[in-house]
Structures are given as structure tokens and as C-alpha cells.
């Protein structure tokens, strides 16, 4: 933020031109070039760092929130706003970038720059998000399909239905993440119904993947192994980032993995599935060296960037290493004749 009403005023360096009211001159070259250089420096250090979820465009307006409430003077021009947004996108080509929503015209311009430009909106649980113009920008309402929508509870509202309204907004707008940092002291004062709605809103935001069934077989060493699985996303948004889903056969005595195959399921782009799970069919070849015997079937979902740890699915049976044991499968030797073997079905129970 370059201007923080009530928390420091004008925070821009002294060499940045000021307007008569004291706020930065948003359209002056010193501000625009300085912000661009700052983003370049930050991007050179942090772009692609897996610990960084997304970067807010910020910069312009009160608290960097792309409005000028509590500020006087001229607003930023459309072309210069696009310049600020593009500066962040260019500096962070491997990171999701978020755009605030109080100005419909500037938001509409920003949406045209990149499909990885997501949404940031304040005041979840308040009607209209306290000044958001997102409903006036159709492209922004659809953006949740390719980039995250991140929001925060404002707090300070005595309305009995604040959290119920927030839950409805999570579902309607497909909000991917919620922050509660603005009012941690309010949780203890919630009524039972408010707490229920608050917890539901936080639980339903983002993605929740359910592996409802998996069928394997026949399993013959040195021969193809067919795996059919059924996946649901019972959250409101996709995962956006890639995840590798691996099906493992483990020796039940030593827990050693004797075979691992990567499934074709794409969790990064899986939209909410409703009552129509995604059916996935994978075909692997079991190595001829796998000894005949019974093996535990595990599924593990990990990030190709090795951060964070294994993904927690919305099913029971999570193991110490983040995998899920689904059942057992018998592998027969490569020289064994198998006649119409019955496949082994394993399933996780939704939590």
C-alpha cells in the first residue's frame, strides 16, 4: 500500500510526487516506475517460490485496495491502472495475482490481461461486500474457474445473519480462501447458529476432493493393470495448482512400495462435480519382477513442487506419510493363467 489512512498516511517514498491532499500522484511517472521496479525486485526473489500462494496487485488507493475512500484528489487513469496490474503479472509469471473489485471499469480492464489474474474481495458476510463492483463485471464472476477468489471476513457487524450470508457468498461466488485475521476475538462471542455457519463457510470454501471408489485388476506380474477410480470435488473451486496422484502397491509387512503409477486424474482443473463424479481409467504395466502375493493399495497426492506436504483428501484412512490405504490386491505370477478374475474394489468413506 502506498497510502494508509489512519495508519501512517502517505507511505510512498519522499521522491514520489504528492497531490495537494497529501496522497501520492497515482499518474506521475515516479510512482508508476517506482512501483514497477519494486515489483521486479520482489518477483526476482519470490516468483515461483512454492510458499507464495498469490500476490495482490495493491499499490493504488486507500490501503492498496484500489479505491480512494478517505482520500482526496485525482484517481488513477485506466491506462496507468493497467500498467500497475501488468507490472505485477510480468514480475510474477509463475504466481497467481489478485485484483481488488471496488472499481468496475478498472476491474474489467484487469480481467482482460491474464486468465491467472484472480479476485480479492473484502467484507465477506456483508451485503455487496461493502462497495465491491464485482457483480458489474461478468468476466470477473467467471474468473474463479481459472484463478482463485480470496476474501476476508470484515467483522464489526452485529447482523445476526452475517455468517449465514457469508456461507451463501462462498457458494455463490466460489470463494477459494477466507481470512479471519481481522476479528479473532469475535469467535468466542458467536451464537451456536453463527458458529455453525462460520465453520461451514470456511470448510466449503476452496476444494475438497473425495475418492469415492477404486477398482483394480486383474493384477498379473508383467501384464497390464487397469485401475478405475471415481473422484468428486465437493468444494466450490478447483485446486488451481498441479497435484500428482500416485497409486502404490506396498508390501504389508515392510511397507515398501513395490509399484507406483501416476494417475491421469487432474485435480488442478477439476471444478465442483455436484452429483456427477469424474470417472478416471488408468492402465499401468506391473513389472515382471513383482513377486506374487497380497499387497496393500495406497493412494498418495503430492505437489510436484514438494511443497506443501501430501494433500489431505476428504476421506478417512490417512496414514502417517499422507497416503491413504484403500484395501488389498493379490498379484499373481507372470506364468499363471488367470481366468476372469474378479476385480478388487476399494473405497474411501467421505468424512
Image (cartoon, rainbow, N blue to C red):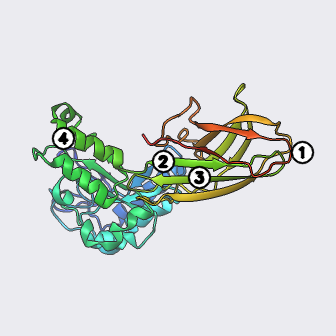
Pointer 3 or 1: first along the chain? 3
Q: Position of residue 342 (x, y in %)?
A: 69, 48
- Residue for badge 4: 194
Closer to the observer: label 3 or label 1?
Answer: 1
SS assignment at label 2: strand
Identity of the residue drawn at 19% across and 30% down:
188
Which of pointers 4 and 3 indicates the residue nearer the eye? 3
In this view of the protein, can residue 214 be seen by the observer? yes
Q: CA distance from mark 2 to mark 4?
A: 27 Å
Q: Residue pushed farthest top?
A: 253
What residue is pinned by disc 2?
210
Residue 45, above or below 133: above
Tell me which label, 2 or 4, sits earlier in the chain.
Answer: 4
Circles 3 and 2, Cβ within 8 Å, touching? The answer is no
Label pair 2/1, CB-CB below 8 angstroms? no
Question: Taking 198 as reference, is 85 left or right?
Answer: right
> In the rendering, which numbered label is found on residue 49?
none
In the rendered structure, which disc, 4 or 1, sits on the residue that comes first in sequence? 4
| Mark positioned earlier in the residue sequence (4 or 3) | 4
Q: Disc 4 and disc 1: Cα gap in Å?
A: 63 Å
Distance in Å between CA atoms under marks 4 and 3: 37 Å
Crowding around mark 4 (Cα neighbors within 10 Å: few <14, some 14 to 19, many 20+) is: some
Looking at the picture, tell me which residue is in the foreground, 334 or 89.
Answer: 334
Callout 4 secondary element: helix
Position in image of residue 346 (x %, y %): 59, 43
Nearer to us of marks 2 and 4 is 2
Disc 3 target residue: 229
Label 3 vs label 2: CA separation? 11 Å
Q: Is 53 displayed left or right of 73 in the figure?
A: right
Residue bearing the label numbered 1: 335
Amino acid at each position: 500500500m502506498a497510502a494508509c489512512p489512519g495508519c501512517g498516511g502517505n507511505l510512498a517514498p519522499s521522491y514520489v510526487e504528492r497531490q495537494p491532499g497529501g496522497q501520492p500522484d497515482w499518474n506521475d511517472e515516479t510512482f508508476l516506475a517506482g512501483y514497477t521496479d519494486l515489483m521486479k525486485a520482489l518477483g526476482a526473489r519470490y516468483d515461483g517460490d512454492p510458499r507464495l500462494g498469490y500476490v495482490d496487485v495493491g499499490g493504488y488507493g486507500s490501503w492498496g485496495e484500489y479505491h480512494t475512500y478517505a482520500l482526496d484528489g485525482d484517481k488513477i487513469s485506466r491506462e496507468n491502472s493497467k500498467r500497475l496490474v501488468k507490472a505485477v503479472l510480468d514480475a510474477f509469471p509463475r504466481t497467481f495475482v489478485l485484483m481488488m473489485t471496488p472499481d468496475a471499469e478498472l476491474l474489467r480492464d484487469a480481467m482482460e490481461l491474464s486468465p491467472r489474474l484472480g479476485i480479492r474481495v473484502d467484507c465477506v458476510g456483508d451485503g455487496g461486500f461493502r462497495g465491491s463492483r464485482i457483480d458489474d463485471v461478468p468476466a470477473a464472476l467467471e474468473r474463479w474457474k481459472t484463478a482463485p477468489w480470496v476474501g476476508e471476513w470484515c467483522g464489526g457487524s452485529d447482523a445476526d445473519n452475517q455468517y449465514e450470508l457469508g456461507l451463501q457468498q462462498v457458494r455463490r461466488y466460489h470463494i477459494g480462501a477466507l481470512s479471519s485475521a481481522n476479528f479473532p476475538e469475535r469467535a468466542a462471542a458467536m451464537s451456536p447458529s453463527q458458529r455453525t455457519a462460520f465453520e461451514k463457510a470456511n470448510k466449503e470454501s476452496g476444494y475438497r476432493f473425495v475418492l469415492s471408489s477404486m477398482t483394480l485388476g486383474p493384477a498379473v506380474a508383467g501384464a497390464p493393470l487397469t485401475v478405475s477410480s471415481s473422484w468428486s470435488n465437493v468444494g466450490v473451486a478447483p485446486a488451481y495448482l498441479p497435484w500428482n496422484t500416485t497409486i502404490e502397491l506396498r508390501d504389508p509387512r515392510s511397507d515398501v512400495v513395490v509399484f507406483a503409477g501416476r494417475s491421469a486424474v487432474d485435480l488442478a482443473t477439476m471444478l465442483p462435480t455436484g452429483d456427477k463424479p469424474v470417472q478416471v481409467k488408468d492402465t499401468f504395466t506391473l513389472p515382471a519382477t513383482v513377486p506374487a502375493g497380497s499387497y496393500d493399495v495406497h493412494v498418495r497426492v503430492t505437489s510436484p513442487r514438494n511443497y506443501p506436504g501430501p494433500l489431505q483428501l476428504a476421506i478417512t484412512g490417512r496414514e502417517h506419510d499422507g497416503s491413504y490405504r484403500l484395501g488389498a490386491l493379490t498379484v499373481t505370477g507372470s506364468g499363471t493363467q488367470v481366468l476372469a478374475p474378479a476385480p478388487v474394489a476399494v473405497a474411501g468413506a467421505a468424512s
